[in-house]
Amino acid sequence: MEHALTINEMFSIEELAKAGLRQLDVPNISAKVFAKDDQVFFFDETNHDLYRLFSIINKRSFFL
């Protein structure tokens, strides 16, 4: 069973990769941006090599 990504939860880069997220290179955005299927995930990078999920949007909205 796949673990759901929850807002304000912390994830390692390995967990994100295992969940099938791929990092997007997005200029002018300080957040780390990942995508999977039709969703885009925004993460804050913490000082413990972890990423805190703070927003999930539809991919179509992201590319507007």
Image (spheres, rainbow, N blue to C red):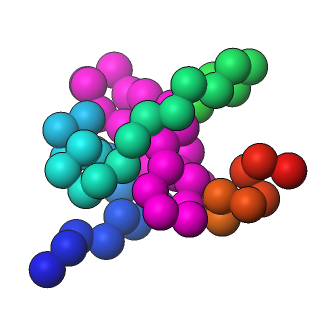
The correct choice, above or below, for 62 with respect to 13 in the image is below
Q: Within the image, what quadrant is residue 13 found in?
A: top left
Is residue 39 highlighted in magenta? yes
The correct choice, above or below, for 59 with respect to 17 in the image is below
The range drawn in magenta is: 32-56
Q: Within the image, what quadrant is residue 6 found in?
A: bottom left
Is residue 55 highlighted in magenta? yes
The reply to whether residue 44 is in sight is no
Side of 20 where 36 appears, left or right? right
Picture residue at 64% right of the left edge, 26% below the top: 26
User: Residue 59, image x and y in percent?
Assistant: 65, 58
Q: Quadrant of the N terminus?
A: bottom left
The reply to whether residue 32 is in sight is yes
As drawn, the residue found furthest toward the right would be 64
Side of 31 where 43 appears, left or right? left
The correct choice, above or below, for 48 with respect to 16 in the image is above
Picture residue at 20% right of the left edge, 73% below the top: 2
User: Residue 58, image x and y in percent?
Assistant: 66, 64
Q: Is the stretch drawn in magenta largely helix, strand or loop?
A: strand
Picture residue at 35% right of the left edge, 55% below the top: 9
